[in-house]
Image (spheres, grey):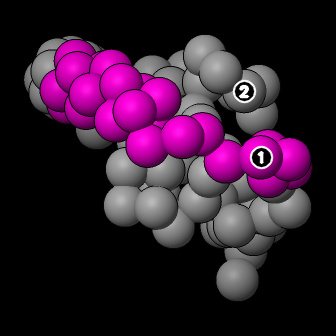
Amino acid sequence: MDDDEAKIEGRLHGEQIEPEQPDNMLQRFIFMVLIAIMISVAQTVLGVATIVQFVVMMVNNQQPNERLADFGTDLGVWIAKAARFQTAASNVKPWPWTELD
């Protein structure tokens, strides 16, 4: 595993501070609805970023924009953490309720 893959793996599955007490079911439902809306927005942003990166690569001799690529990685990590909360694989809420690491 190269350094970038290890870094992303750590961000996804590294130590996360679980809340001392889990949310009650009504609170969790509200968070799940809000996060589902945020995931939908994130998918739209990902689609736009994909198109922009493709255009950049066409113009820039197949070289991607590194900042946009890093943004895509961060967005992917956020979506993964949100999905873990949504499916109850974790009680840790994604950003903005926790740090965006």
The x and y percentages for residue 30 are 36, 25
Look at 54% across and 40% down and name the residue there: 24
- Residue stretch in magenta: 17-43
The x and y percentages for residue 97 are 65, 21
Q: Tell me, yes or no, whether the highlighted magenta stretch contains residue 90.
A: no
Q: Could you tell me if residue 6 is visible in this image?
A: yes
Dot 2 corresponds to which residue? 98
In this picture, residue 8 sits left or right of residue 39: right
Look at 18% across and 26% down and name the residue there: 40
Name the one closer to the observer, 87 or 23: 23
- Whole-angstrom CA distance, mark 2 to mark 1, is 15 Å
Name the one closer to the observer, 58 or 11: 11
Identify whether 90 is placed above or below 19.
below
Dot 1 corresponds to which residue? 21
Dividing the picture into quarters, in which one does residue 23 lie? top right
Tag 2–tag 1 contact (CB < 8 Å): no
Identify whether 48 is placed above or below 84.
above
Overall secondary structure of the magenta stretch? helix
Q: Is disc 2 surrounded by few (<14), some (14 to 19) or many (20+) residues within 10 Å? A: few
Q: Amino acid at mark 2?
A: Thr
Identify whether 12 is placed above or below 77.
below
In this picture, residue 70 sits left or right of residue 101: left
